Image: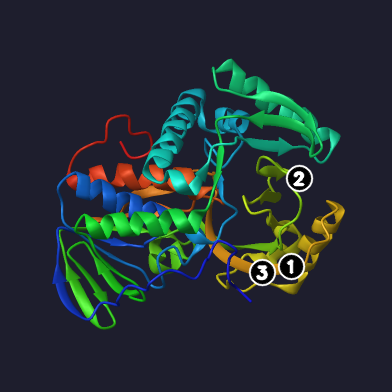
Amino acid sequence: MNTPVWDDGNWHPLPHLEGNLEGEFCVVGLGGSGLSAILELLRLGRTVVGIDAGSVAGGAAGRNGGFLLAGAAKFYHQSVAEHGPALARRLYQATLEQIAHMQRETPEAIWPVGSLRIAASEEELQDCAAHLKALRADGFEAEPYEGPEGQGLLIPSDAAFNPLQRCRTLARQALEAGARLFENTPAHKISGQEVQTLQGCIRCQKVLVAVDGRLEHLLPELKGRVRTARLQMLATAPVARRYKRPVYRRWGYDYWQQLPDGRIALGGMRDAGGEAEWTAQNEPSDTVQHRLEALLHQLGIEAPITHRWAASVGYSANGLPIAEEVRPDVWAIGAYSGTGNVVGALLGREAAWVLHGSRRPGAVLLT
């Protein structure tokens, strides 16, 4: 069992690439960031070929917890301290605007309900207060929270969504706009003017590698700066309504939300797996799954477990994503440190403008 709760089984697979193609740009990776880049390039009037080693959003983009959180991977007050107030504020504002853009693109897949950060200790509760203070100081929405989930803070501008539904919708939009997309087409060799696959070749002007997990395997020059980890989740049969908003708890190591049909999607416990979770394998492990079950019982949820799944994501040392030209005319974006749904989509759009030979107005990370 390694199927995410998001998969309704209605996707019609895309073909794999056979033979040679030409296009102005090639995007490697058909997750949220790659598809956002493809759509932005199409809006700019460019021609694009997109490939993925698996299926559309078959990696972490369609196998995550379904959180749309503003900001970088670090909590806002941590970002201010580590990245500086100017960058932290600009990035937070840009991700707020990106969430709004995503709602306009795929309204049926997004639930604008906010999010909760819930403390699991007195120390974390004090940190929530610091988090709240920093957000309010810079004019961002946040409120202290106390409710059935616990104590912490409410961030009204965040959202929840179905990540796989969104990506598949974006892929359909891209195909309708003229993109050529191919599944089950791993990149074998990448240069700025050519991407070779096992059964074909794409000749182009520039390449964007939009891959999160295993990015350092695809581009070995990033080893030491990017490290792949496994994130695991499970889901239950529907239960009575308990949670209005997605919940981030225990410094983000535990997270869950209740879907519109009543099912609970719960993930985390990566720290319980220790070093074994720093792996490119994406099969669920007994150690972490048992801990997730224990958390489910701790929350008082006794419904049958219907899904278990895992995905690979990339972490960077400083919590900021990779966004750079790593080879001549080969750009890479990834290593979102577990929170790539918003930042990844934003970076995809920024990267499209860079490939186009310009700068996206308001760009934050690729300027």
Going by the numbered disc 1, the residue's amino acid type is Ile
Q: Is residue 168 above or below residue 46?
A: below
Going by the numbered disc 3, the residue's amino acid type is Arg
Residue 75 location (% of width, % of height): 61, 35
Image point (18%, 46%), residue name: 356
Residue 51 location (% of width, % of height): 31, 67
Packing grade of label 2 (10 A; few <14, some 14-19, many >=20) is: few
Image point (49%, 43%), residue name: 320
Residue 16 location, quadrant: bottom left
Q: Which mark is residue 305?
A: 1
47 or 326, which is in the foreground? 47
Tag 2 secondary structure: loop
123 or 140, which is in the foreground? 140
Residue 142 location (% of width, % of height): 63, 24
Which mark is nearer the camera, 1 or 3? 1
* Alpha carbon separation for disc pair 1 and 2: 17 Å
Q: Which residue is mark 2?
A: 242
Choose the circle earlier in sequence order: 1 or 2.
2
Residue 146 location, quadrant: top right
Q: Which residue is mark 3?
A: 308
Tag 1 secondary structure: strand
Tag 3 secondary structure: strand
* Alpha carbon separation for disc pair 1 and 3: 8 Å
Which mark is nearer the camera, 1 or 2? 2
Judge from the rendering whether residue 260 lies leftward or rightward of residue 129; answer left or right: left
Judge from the rendering whether residue 112 lies leftward or rightward of residue 272; answer left or right: left
Packing grade of label 3 (10 A; few <14, some 14-19, many >=20) is: many
Judge from the rendering whether residue 272 lies leftward or rightward of residue 343; answer left or right: right
Quadrant containing the N terminus is bottom right
Image point (21%, 45%), residue name: 43
Mark 1–mark 3 CB contact (< 8 Å): yes
